Image (spheres, rainbow, N blue to C red):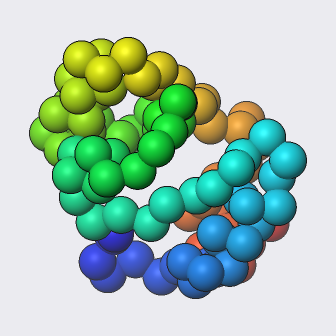
Amino acid sequence: NKPGVKIYYNYNQRKEFIDALRIVNETVLYTQVDETIKTIDFDILVVGPDQTHEGFQRAFNWCKEHNKEVVVLERTPGISSTQLREGNK
């Protein structure tokens, strides 16, 4: 949810890519992560290193209280989402 940012792939395309990974059972689109996680069954919450705002802090606390693992997935070296959005290689 990044207003004003040109998205390279739409949400459904991005969801399809991630769902195709054999290590991921399901991806869930959300607007309020700290509320959404209360409504789904999961074992591990995987986030990016930039997902640190207050909603994520509340989500992390909820995970801790409910014995859910939180994994921070570091960015892939040499891959720039900004360049991808702009169509650069």
| Any part of residue 33 in sight | no
Q: Quadrant of the N terminus?
A: bottom left
Q: Nearer the viewer, residue 45 or 85?
A: 45
Eyeballing the image, is 81 above or below 38? below
Describe residue 12's horizontal placement relative to residue 21 as left or right.
left
Residue 40: percent from left, percent from top: 40, 50
Eyeballing the image, is 84 above or below 61? below
Describe residue 87's horizontal placement relative to residue 36 as left or right.
right
| Any part of residue 39 in sight | yes
Residue 20: percent from left, percent from top: 82, 61
Residue at position x 71%, y 59% in the image: 18
Residue 80: percent from left, percent from top: 65, 53
Residue at position x 68%, y 79% in the image: 13
Residue at position x 58%, y 58% in the image: 27
Quarter of the figure with residue 10 = bottom right
Q: Nearer the viewer, residue 46 or 64?
A: 64
Q: Quadrant of the C terminus?
A: bottom right
Residue at position x 46%, y 44% in the image: 41
Q: How many marks?
A: 0
Describe residue 28's horizontal placement relative to residue 80 as left or right.
left
Eyeballing the image, is 29 above or below 80? below
Residue 70: percent from left, percent from top: 45, 24
